[in-house]
Image (spheres, rainbow, N blue to C red):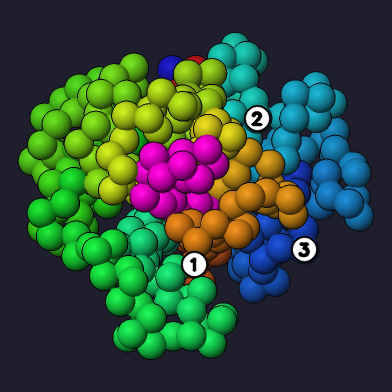
Amino acid sequence: MIESICTPQEEGRRISVACDLFLDLKLYRLPEWAHTQLERRFPDVDIVEVNTPSSSLFSEQSEIYWGNRITPDIIEKMPNLKWIHFGSVGVNRVNIQDLSRQNILVTSSKGGVVYPMVASALSFMTGLARGVHYVQKMREDGTMSRESFDAYFDRIHDLLGERCLIVGFGDVGKHLARVCDALGMHVSAIEREPSCHKLVDSSFTLDKLPDAVLEADYVINLLPLNNDTKGVFNRKVFSRMSRNAFFINIGRGETVDEDALIDALNKGVIAGAGLDVFAKEPLTIDSPLWKMENVMLSPHIAGLSQSYWKGQIELFQYNLKCYVENRSYSMKNLVNG
């Protein structure tokens, strides 16, 4: 456990926060109202724009880094750095063990996108089950009618009694399990250690993935990217899935062998897919996925919500208050080395 390394805020002492949340996308751009709120609540804290196309500065004097784009090189150039707060759930851009040895705190935004992620998983599940992707194609072609949709009659599902495998059983996975249970589905899960959950019929570890997918109608990938998960959805895994099963990925693109997935979709090894993330983003224009009738696509937006920044600012302000009051042990989402 990292000991408290923050000094209480002394009268007249200013704290500098290096922040990269000044990009074009709203997901990565600190709203003006949030900036104003932070200035009002923390008058002795300066938010300094760094590591953006318009400002490549790294701010040597900053004690805090807030954002998503920090690198080991930037850390080396910040001798006063004491705390990194990621605006994302994943913290794989840094080596947590190294930072722990340097007494640099790391916090994440874990929990901030649970509800939009669950909603996104559910939209893919219900969309694929109800043939929304087929209807969209008919709409584009101007052929939408009950008569034309009759060709897909035998491909339409209603979720009741069907089996969902949730791969990655963290906050999002657990909430998704509750939703699936409410829909009358059977739920199994891949997690770090097998355990008993009220809403889960079967629990597996990641090395048992090829066995776990055998009975699933929906395989939902929520995995983070690390050495253990890279390319874990491979040809062997897809070959063991049911021909009526759907693969849904709102985790990380590089956890999937994309060529193997495309091959499985082309050959009817699996019924279809809902994909929010890809091996290369944005999805390359020559990818076969664009034209596949049995695939639903979205551009890495599963975690978006109009309430996103409200939660982000509440979390950062809470942790910043702990920091200036020398209560790092009370910070939320501390990541231990």
- Identified at 50% across, 45% down, the residue is 266
Find residue 93 and name its label.
Answer: 2
The residue nearer to you, when weighing 177 against 102, is 177
- Identified at 44% across, 85% down, the residue is 144
Residue on which the image places disc 1: 305
Residue on which the image places disc 3: 24
Which is more N-terminal, label 3 or label 1? 3
- Identified at 77% across, 38% down, the residue is 62
Quadrant including the N terminus: top left
Q: CA distance from mark 2 to mark 3?
A: 21 Å
Q: What is the x, y in percent for residue 287?
A: 68, 49
Q: What is the x, y in percent for residue 208?
A: 29, 19
Magenta stretch: give its range. Answer: 262-276
Q: Which kind of residue does numbered mark 2 sit on?
A: Arg
Q: What is the x, y in percent for residue 2?
A: 49, 19
Q: In the rendered structure, are the residues bearing label 2 and label 1 in contact, judged by CB atoms less than 8 Å apart? A: no
Q: Is residue 149 left or right of residue 290?
A: left
The residue nearer to you, when weighing 176 against 244, is 244
Q: Is residue 157 left or right of residue 168?
A: left
In this picture, is 170 found above or below 48? above
The residue nearer to you, when weighing 213 against 167, is 213
In this picture, is 273 found above or below 83? below
Q: Secondary structure at mark 2?
A: loop
Would residue 268 be counted in the magenta stretch? yes
Q: Which kind of residue does numbered mark 1 sit on?
A: Ser
- Identified at 52% across, 38% down, the residue is 263
Q: CA distance from mark 2 to mark 1?
A: 24 Å
Q: CA distance from mark 1 to mark 3?
A: 17 Å
Q: Is residue 51 left or right of residue 237?
A: right
Tell me which corner region of the image, top left, top right, bottom left or bottom right, holds residue 141.
Answer: bottom right
